[in-house]
Image (tube, helix red, strand yellow):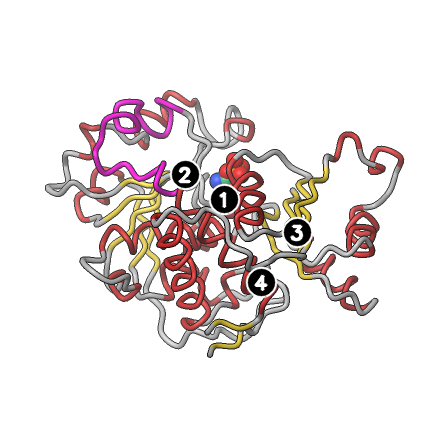
């Protein structure tokens, strides 16, 4: 029996190897049940999962809500525009209100980095039993995305049984706007935990040199690193050079709202240099897997041809795998033990 050690989930920086394995093992079991035709199980009957999304989301919000329903939990959905936020209620008071209604888990997305720590601290201070699960906070962290991304890669590379060790020494190329990406930060923690060597590729305005030291630069509320040995991070400014040696590629969304006039001369020049196309991919002799957390900007960071026709484009697998991964996270926060 494994004891789940976290009341709240804020960041993969605090995940041990055993934590990852507990999530993957459970996700695999939920996957198997679904494949055998069992869509709903009574595991969290009577539990209340509340989704507090203060920022837009298609994948994460709906997949957490579906995951909760598949575990038979009650699901409560908060809509900011019709809530008392519009009357001046604070985010923290909103969270306290839902906790008082009996929420067992608050799944929270917000544009402010580290806000989930603040909410959890406040809830703990009033002896609330409610758990906080970060569904994306500012630029900081998106743990469920990081988990589903590496689960997708592990499934792709594993021959028979699911084995996270297959990531050891794999070269995983992340292309694009790493500076603004909470997904990239979560991927860096998750991939490096299993010994992957990550190559970050993009212009200096989107990937600062400081990312060379990302794994050893503490962020607020980070515990001592529970992973003894991690893989590496290197930065390469040339897509042509880095694609040649990659075993897998994760393409990031270009955040157009932050780009023009500030960080890039134009979207077209970005696409020319860093947009992933069949032609650039063919510099690699293998049919390497392509991931993208979504939403995608077609023909900007990735060509429509790759999205629609490349056999190892795993974008839809990522979406599919998000459900058992989020079921596992909700289960672990609510049950604390895995047998
Ligand atoms: N990947 C991701 O977080 O997508 P959504 O914004 O649609 O949830």
Q: Nearer the viewer, mark 1 or mark 3?
A: 3
Q: CA distance from mark 1 to mark 3?
A: 26 Å
Looking at the image, the residue that sits furthest to the left is: 285
Distance CA(mark 4)–CA(mark 2):
22 Å
The quadrant in which residue 197 appears is bottom left
Query: Circles 1 and 4: CB distance less than 8 Å?
Result: no
The residue pinned by badge 4 equals: 219
Across and down, in percent, residue 272 comes to 30, 25
Residue 239: give x, y in percent of width and height: 26, 38
Q: Residue at x 73, y 55 (%)?
A: 103
Q: Earlier in the sequence, mark 1 or mark 3?
A: 3
Please determine whether, in this image, residue 6 is positioned above or below residue 244.
below
Q: Quickly name the residue at label 1.
A: 181
Task: Answer whether residue 330 is magenta in the image.
Answer: no
Q: Residue furthest right?
A: 87
Whether residue 116 is visible: no
Distance from label 3 to label 2 (Cα)?
29 Å
Q: Marks 3 and 2: which is nearer the front?
A: 3
């Amino acid at each position: 029996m494994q004891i789940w050690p976290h009341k709240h989930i804020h960041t993969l920086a605090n995940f041990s190897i055993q934590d990852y394995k507990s999530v993957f093992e459970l996700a695999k079991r939920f996957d198997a049940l679904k494949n055998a035709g069992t869509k709903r199980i009574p595991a969290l009957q009577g539990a209340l999962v509340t989704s507090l999304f203060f920022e837009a989301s298609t994948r994460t919000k709906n997949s957490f809500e579906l995951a909760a329903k598949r575990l038979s939990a009650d699901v409560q959905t908060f809509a900011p525009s019709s809530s008392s936020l519009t009357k001046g209620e604070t985010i923290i008071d909103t969270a306290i209100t839902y906790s008082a209604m009996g929420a067992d888990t608050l799944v929270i997305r917000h544009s402010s980095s580290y806000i989930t720590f603040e909410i959890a601290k406040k809830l703990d201070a009033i002896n609330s039993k409610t758990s906080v699960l970060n569904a994306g906070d500012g630029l900081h962290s998106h743990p469920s995305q990081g988990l589903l991304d590496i689960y997708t890669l592990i499934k792709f590379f594993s021959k028979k049984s699911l084995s996270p060790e297959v990531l050891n020494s794999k070269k995983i190329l992340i292309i694009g706007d790493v500076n603004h990406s909470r997904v990239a930060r979560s991927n860096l923690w998750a991939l490096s935990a299993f010994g992957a060597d990550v190559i970050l590729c993009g212009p200096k305005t989107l990937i600062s040199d400081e990312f060379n030291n990302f794994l050893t630069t503490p962020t607020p509320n980070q515990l001592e690193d529970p992973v003894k040995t991690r893989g590496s991070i290197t930065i390469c400014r040339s897509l042509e050079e880095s694609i040649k040696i990659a075993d897998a590629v994760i393409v990031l969304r270009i955040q157009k709202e932050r780009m023009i006039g500030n960080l890039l001369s134009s979207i077209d020049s970005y696409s020319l240099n860093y947009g992933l196309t069949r032609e650039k991919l063919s510099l690699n002799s293998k049919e390497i897997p392509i991931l993208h957390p979504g939403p995608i900007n077609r023909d900007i960071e990735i060509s429509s041809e790759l999205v629609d026709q490349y056999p190892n484009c795993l974008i839809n697998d990522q979406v599919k795998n998000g459900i058992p991964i989020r079921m596992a996270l909700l289960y672990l926060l609510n049950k604390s033990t895995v047998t």
